[in-house]
Amino acid sequence: MRIIKYPDPRLRKKCAPVTEFNDELRALATRMLELMKAAPGVGLAAPQVGVLLRMFVCNVTGEEGDDCVLVNPEIRDASGWKEAEEGCLSIPEVYVQVRRSLRCTVVAQDLDGNPIELRGEDLPARVWQHETDHLNGVLILDRMGPADEIATRKKLRELEAQYAASG
């Protein structure tokens, strides 16, 4: 398993809900957490490893016990706004300003299908929104402004050429 890179078309797909909570799903989550930490990153969505299911992993503190797996997440009660720089493990070396809700609640399920509800602000809220975007085929490139569009053009062309060459 590896992290797929822009412009892989799987990154643009809307993911299917998880309906089976089993050992295969747990193994996927474990491997995704390993990949995320090795990258290193704070979040990784299933489509970023080529699996088109509504699940992501995250750890916004970097502390060993703070790993989080959210299955079938939905963002609710978003409020406030903040613009901040974001990167993405699937779009290496590209950092853009993204405006997101400052606070939100994420309602999801754990790996056993039990309901989870988390409320966060600033970095946790940003990560949950970023990863949920992935589950809907939305990338940070879709949320950047014109200045970042110009600034990233060369790097995006390089990534597109690398993808075409790997073909």
Image: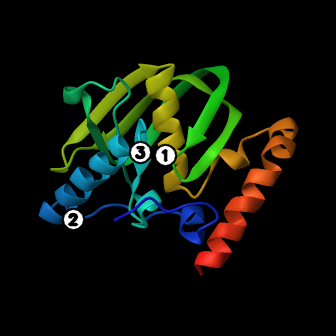
Residue type for callout 1: Thr
Q: Quadrant of residue 59?
A: top left
- Between the residue at mark 2 and the residue at mark 3, the CA separation in whole angstroms equals 28 Å
Residue positioned 43% across, 67% down in the render: 50
Foreground label between 2 and 3:
3
Instruction: Give the mark toward the camera: 2 or 1.
Output: 1
Q: Mark 3 belongs to which amino acid?
A: Ala
Look at the numbered disc 2 and give the secondary structure of its residue.
loop
Residue 22 seen in the figure = yes
Q: CA distance from mark 2 to mark 1?
A: 19 Å
Q: Residue at x 68, y 33 (%)?
A: 98
Helix, strand or loop status at disc 1: helix
**Residue that mark 2 sits on:** 20
157 with respect to 24 (left or right): right
Badge 1 crowding class, 10 Å Cα cut-off, few under 14, some 14 to 19, many 20 or more, is: many
Sequence-wise, the earlier of marks 2 and 3 is 2
Horizontal arrangement in the rendering, residue 27 relative to residue 1 (left or right): left
Position in image of residue 25 (x %, y %): 22, 60
Residue that numbered label 1 is attached to: 132
Query: How far across and down, in percent of the image, does residue 74 sit?
Result: 44, 43
Quick one: SS at disc 3? loop
For marks 2 and 1, the one nearer the N-term is 2
**Dot 3 or dot 1, earlier in sequence:** 3
Q: Quadrant of residue 117?
A: top left
In this view of the protein, which residue sits in the foreground, 25 or 115? 25
- Residue receiving disc 3: 39
Look at the image and name its color scheme.
Answer: rainbow
Other residues around mark 2 within 10 Å, as few (<14) / some (14–19) / many (≥20): few
Instruction: Judge by depth and name the residue closer to the eye, 14 or 66.
Output: 66
